[in-house]
Image (cartoon, rainbow, N blue to C red):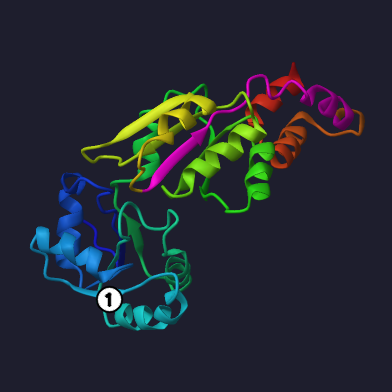
Amino acid sequence: MKEYDFYIVPTPIGNLGDITNRAIDVLNSVDIIACEDMRVTQKLLNHFDIKTKCISYHKFNEKERVNYFLNILGEGKKIALVSDAGTPLFCDPGAVIVDELRKNNFTVTSLAGANAVATFLSQVPRKGEDFVFVGFLPKPKQQIENLLNKYKSTDIVFYDSPNRVMNTLQTIHACRPNSRVAIGRELTKIFEEIVINDTEKVIEHFENNILKGEIVGLVFREKNSNDDFSDKIELLKSKGFKAKEISVILSELFGANKNDIYKKCIN
């Protein structure tokens, strides 16, 4: 098997049985494991009897760790990056060091493994394959509404915290009264739950429940949300834009599906 300088290693999002044999082998074989919270990672390592040295790497020390890691790798040693749960770089640190590693010609690879978005979406029936992942939703209500208005014609996938999600659902319902959502919590754990319904019904479902664990959510695309693009398409055509250009312009401006707009242009 090919060896790399730097490994991005997914860790379980709840069920320890979801770690892969390759992940265990890599964590055993590298010289250093870079992790968000050493206490969290150490529990995982102890469970699998992994003795590799850990060093903290989180959003507050990302930049200052870069030179240290480059020096370590320059000595011929190998590093694995993990987050507290799931796949690094999905709303977790890692982008800074990976960018620098590639600039300095170190080899980087990512292992397949647990990811909350993929785990969630594989249980949620959708009308199309396209979606936009926006990470953790912003706190201001207006910013959430801006996202909902921008991405009317595609599914919006997001992370949220249990103490905020009810406010998020209220904001979604106020902005899109007829919307449907899916909310997943405690994924891969004993009390895993995914609720798919009209937003109002989902609010009612969770009103009397104590929510725990990180939340993954989805706001389903609005029905017939592309209907109002006809006038815009004709206007851009009259200005000399081609179908491919129009599909790119409108998808960027309104978060619509580029292929759907292209089909409307040529039809």
Looking at the rendered structure, the number of numbered marks drawn on it comes to 1
The quarter in which the C terminus is drawn is: top right
The residue closer to the viewer here, 50 or 108, is 50
The residue lying furthest to the left in this view is 49
**Measuring 44% from the left and 74% from the top, which residue is drawn there?**
62
Q: In this view, does 262 lie to the left or right of 57?
A: right
Q: Is residue 239 above or below residue 101?
A: above
Q: What element carries label 1?
A: strand
Q: Specify few, some or many for label 1: CA neighbours under 10 Å numbering under 14, 14-19, or 20 or more.
A: some
Residue behind mark 1: 55
**Measuring 54% from the left and 49% from the top, which residue is drawn there?**
137
Look at label 1 and name its amino acid: Ile
Residue 132 in view (yes/no): no
The quarter in which the N terminus is drawn is: bottom left
Q: What stretch is highlighted in magenta?
A: 214-236
Picture coordinates of residue 216, whole percent (x, y):
42, 41
Residue 221 falls within the magenta-colored stretch: yes
Picture coordinates of residue 51, whole percent (x, y):
11, 70
Residue 29 in view (yes/no): yes
The residue closer to the viewer here, 244 or 15, is 15
Q: Is residue 107 above or below residue 21?
A: below
The residue lying furthest to the right in this view is 238
Picture coordinates of residue 55, whole percent (x, y):
27, 76
The residue closer to the viewer here, 110 or 231, is 231
